[in-house]
């Protein structure tokens, strides 16, 4: 089952996809762009400073991302367009 199948029941509603900026964020961004779904990329370092916590797993992280997104407190990172990613990697952007 892929991400779109999991989101299918909610696609008729106003949803925003929140993702933590990690090494594999780009495929979610590309998928959301393909299906015209809004996506917000959270800055991992600043998110950690806000919600901290010793326990870390997908369930805890997803809840914290959702709460930060809903409250408008999610520190955002720049979502590099697909065409610019190779340029960014060569230039050493983060």
Image (spheres, rainbow, N blue to C red):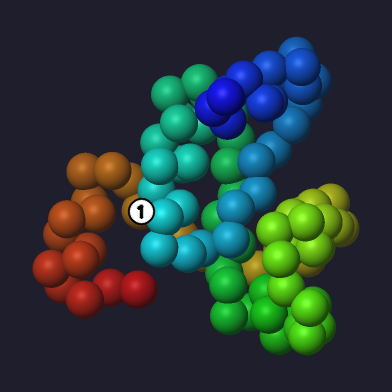
Q: Dividing the picture into quarters, in which one does residue 56 lie?
A: bottom right
* Residue 13 percent location from the top left of the image: 79, 20
**Residue shown at 71% from the left, 85% from the top:** 49
Is residue 3 shown above or below 92?
above
Q: Nearer the viewer, residue 33 or 31?
A: 31
Q: Can residue 13 be seen in this view?
A: yes
Q: Residue at x 57, y 69 (%)?
A: 43
Whether residue 68 appears in this view of the structure is no
Res 88 → quadrant: bottom left
62 lies above or below 6:
below
Is the N terminus in the top left, top right, bottom left or bottom right quadrant? top right
Q: Residue tagged by mark 1?
A: 80
Dot 1, how many residues are within 10 Å of its Cα: few (below 14), some (14-19), or many (20+)? some
Where residue 32 appears, as percent x and y from the top left, is 51, 32
Q: Position of residue 23 (x, y in %)?
A: 40, 63
Count of numbered circles in the view: 1
Nearer-the-camera pick, 41 or 63: 63
Left or right: where 13 falls relative to 11: right
Q: In this view, does 44 lie to the left or right of 22?
A: right
Q: In the drawing, does residue 90 fall left or right of residue 20?
A: left
Query: Disc 1 on helix, strand or loop?
Result: loop
């Amino acid at each position: 089952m892929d991400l779109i199948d999991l989101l299918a029941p909610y696609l008729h509603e106003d949803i925003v996809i929140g993702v933590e900026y990690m090494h594999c964020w780009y495929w979610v961004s590309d998928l959301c762009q393909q299906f015209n779904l809004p996506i917000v990329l959270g800055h991992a370092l600043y998110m950690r400073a806000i919600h901290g916590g010793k326990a870390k797993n997908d369930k805890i992280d997803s809840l914290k991302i959702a709460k930060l997104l809903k409250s408008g407190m999610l520190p955002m990172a720049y979502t590099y367009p697909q065409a610019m990613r190779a340029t960014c990697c060569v230039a050493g952007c983060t």
